[in-house]
């Protein structure tokens, strides 16, 4: 059995990764550590709570004592660090939690790995936002792994800091790190504060959908399962000390994404409301993922039109999941589930 620690697994990408790993590998055991911040929802993991290959631990990655005790007792083969404050707008309103979890938390995990782990890999889940942005009128430019770090928001700055910490622990202490920098994900279990699930949940309630500025900012959208498969490859076949970009070859202006979502829901474009722009709003992200393709054979499998239909259908079929988040009931439901497993 291979024992994998997944931090932040009660959130969007981490939960999708856990489901993917347990389905794709019979010889994998997962321990999920999550503090259940506002973005964590144990209901997402409910079907796994009695799975003998899965264990949930409620803990904060900044809690050094708790992390050291966990690493000492569990002997992880691989650590995949998804745990983060992940929403750019929240980082603009209050940066501190981002510095704590994203930088200090990553440092604590690296120390725990170094001190108690004899694991083969520490994988840091990072973002394309560490490269800053690209101009809208230069479609020939892409982020490669060599693009200098040039961050815009407290969020992206905290993620870039964590990346540098990981690379320093590789060089100084020989911690076997890999880093992946992915573009915008979409799919099931995404918290309805992010663009696509926010648009779906508001449009289904016939509420206006807020588009920042003129909606011309461009993101490179990737279906979440394609991201999970890329991380699976990198932790098993990637080279330590290396950074891998992950992207969808799928650039879209926000306004086009919103129109696609509204069309899939059969809702009118008159719901669109142009609102004040995000301060420091990055113009365009575009990833060159050719290193991952060349070295590990990864390509994105899901076309945007198919992925969006699947995602919209999931939010239509699972309205209780996101309505419980909007009402706040998910906090109580998570606590009840925690009570059952502890
Ligand atoms: P998310 O906000 O949905 O989930 C984050 C999870 O981390 C939550 O379950 C939360 O409870 C947990 N968490 C937060 N602080 C914690 C702490 N101190 N201790 C333990 N757990 C804590 O985020 P996501 O969108 O799933 O992103 C996961 C990772 O992927 C992040 O590191 C993010 O930077 C990165 N990423 C996200 C995207 C994207 O499009 N969503 C793209 C590229 C990279
Ligand atoms: O209400 C909105 N209206 C709007 O126009 C929201 C929430 C967003 N937007 C715009 C801002 C961005 O240009 O849509 C785009 C996408 O916004 P978010 O969903 O907030 O994502 P983004 O800021 O691009 O960051 C995401 O991708 C990279 C994730 O949240 C990060 O965690 C990841 O690192």
Image (cartoon, grey):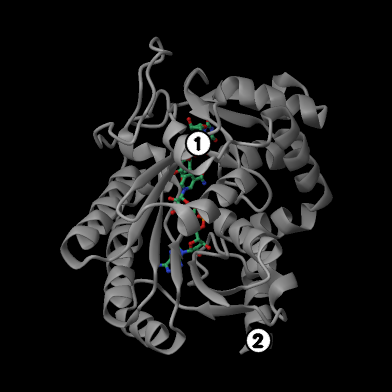
Which element type, helix, strand or loop, lies under badge 2? helix
Question: In terms of image quadrants, where is residue 209?
Answer: top right
In the image, which disc is placed on residue 168? none
In terms of sequence position, does the residue under pointer 1 or pointer 2 come before the other? 1
Q: Residue at x 50, y 18 (%)?
A: 216
Query: Between residues 239 and 114, which one lies in front from this camera angle?
Result: 239
Left or right, residue 160 beside residue 292: left
> Which residue bears the numbered disc 2?
341
User: Looking at the picture, does residue 144 appear above or below residue 4?
Assistant: above
Q: In the figure, is residue 20 to the left or right of 117?
A: right
Looking at the rendering, in which quadrant would you find the C terminus? bottom right
Coordinates of residue 51 in the picture (x, y in percent): 71, 79
What is the C-alpha distance between the residues marked 1 and 2? 41 Å
Displayed quadrant of residue 122: bottom left
Identify the residue under disc 1: 293
Decide: is 7 above or below 318.
Answer: below
3 relative to 157 in the view: left or right: right
Q: Secondary structure at mark 1?
A: helix
Residue 248 in percent (x, y) is at 55, 32
Which one is in front, 273 or 69?
69
Q: 170 or 335: which is nearer to us?
A: 170
Res. 322 in view: yes
Q: How many marks?
A: 2
Q: Quadrant of residue 206?
A: top right
Residue 226 position, x and y percent, is: 61, 44
| Vertical comparison of 194 with 38: above or below | above
| Cβ atoms at labels 1 and 2 below 8 Å apart | no
- Image point (59%, 21%), residue name: 255
């Amino acid at each position: 059995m291979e024992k994998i620690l997944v931090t932040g697994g009660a959130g969007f990408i981490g939960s999708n990764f856990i489901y993917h790993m347990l389905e794709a590998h019979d010889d994998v055991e997962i321990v999920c550590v999550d503090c259940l911040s506002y973005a964590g929802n144990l209901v997402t993991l409910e079907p796994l709570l009695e799975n003998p290959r899965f264990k949930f631990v409620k803990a904060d990655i900044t809690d050094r004592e708790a992390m050291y005790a966990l690493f000492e007792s569990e002997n992880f083969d691989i650590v995949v660090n998804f745990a983060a404050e992940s929403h750019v707008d929240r980082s603009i309103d209050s940066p501190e939690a981002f510095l704590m979890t994203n930088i200090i938390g990553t440092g604590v995990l690296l120390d725990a790995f170094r001190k108690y782990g004899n694991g083969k890999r520490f994988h840091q889940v990072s973002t394309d936002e560490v490269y800053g942005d690209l101009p809208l009128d230069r479609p020939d430019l892409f982020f490669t792994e060599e693009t200098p770090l040039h961050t815009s928001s407290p969020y992206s700055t905290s993620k870039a800091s964590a990346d540098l910490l990981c690379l320093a622990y590789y060089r100084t202490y020989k911690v076997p790190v890999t880093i992946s920098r992915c573009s915008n994900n979409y799919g099931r279990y995404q918290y309805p504060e992010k663009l696509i699930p926010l648009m779906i949940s508001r449009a289904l309630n016939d509420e206006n959908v807020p588009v920042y500025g003129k909606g011309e900012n461009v993101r490179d959208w990737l279906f979440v399962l394609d991201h999970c498969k890329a991380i699976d490859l990198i932790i098993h076949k990637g080279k330590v000390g290396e950074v891998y970009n992950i992207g969808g070859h799928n650039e879209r202006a926000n306004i086009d994404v919103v129109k696609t979502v509204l069309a899939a829901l059969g809702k009118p474009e008159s719901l669109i409301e142009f609102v004040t722009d995000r301060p420091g709003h990055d113009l365009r992200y575009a990833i060159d993922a050719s290193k991952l393709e060349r070295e590990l054979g990864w390509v994105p499998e899901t076309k945007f039109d198919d992925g969006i239909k699947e995602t919209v259908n999931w939010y239509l079929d699972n309205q209780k999941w996101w309505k419980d988040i909007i009402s706040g009931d998910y906090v109580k439901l998570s606590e009840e589930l925690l009570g059952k497993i502890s």
